[in-house]
Image (cartoon, helix red, strand yellow):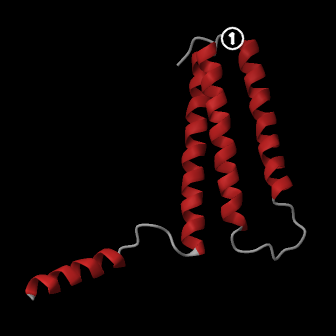
Amino acid sequence: MKQYKVLFILTALLFSINLYPQTQSEMTYAALQDYKLADTAINEVYNKILKEYKSDKVFIRNLKESQALWIKFRDAEVKLKFHDYNSKAGSTRTMCQLFLLKDLTEARTSELKKMARSRGGG
């Protein structure tokens, strides 16, 4: 009988541990953390390319212009998909915007990595 009590207590403890976000604010916070990781990754790749190819002034100028335009594109995509028809858009809006920002950022990071490899970098 004592074994069942211990098993019950352990099971109750496992269920009380919040391994996955469950409230909207927890899910939005998790989405924000995922986006921050993606943003950190893109900045690391971008800065690595700037450093590796600093002697190629034309390439660096074009890369900076491309990145600035990509940021405008990214922001326009978010605005397009989450337009402001009304202020009562729902509590999931921010989370969904963060998902989109993360996806767009990860795609751009992949493109930057391909660009670096095609130029002979890492």
Q: Badge 1 is on which residue?
A: 56
Left or right: where 26 falls relative to 114: left
* Snapshot quadrant of residue 10: bottom left
Question: Dot 1, crowdedness within 10 Å: few (<14), some or many (≥20)?
Answer: few
Residue 90 seen from this side: yes
Instruction: Examine the rendering and report whether any part of residue 50 can be seen.
Output: no
Q: Residue furthest right?
A: 85
Identify which residue, 11 or 63, lies in the foreground.
Answer: 11
For image coordinates 76% across by 40% down, the residue present is: 71
Tally of marks: 1
Q: Position of residue 87 (x, y in %)?
A: 84, 74
Residue nearest the observer in this picture, 75 or 24: 24
Pinpoint residue 114: horizontal percent, then vertical percent. Answer: 62, 23
Q: Quadrant of the N terminus?
A: bottom left
- The amino acid pointed to by label 1 is Asp
The image position of residue 9, as x and y in percent, is: 22, 83
> Is 59 rendered above or below residue 31?
above
| 68 left or right of 23 in image | right
Say which of 74 and 59 sits in front.
74
Residue at x-position 40% and y-position 72%: 18
Which image quadrant is residue 47 in? top right
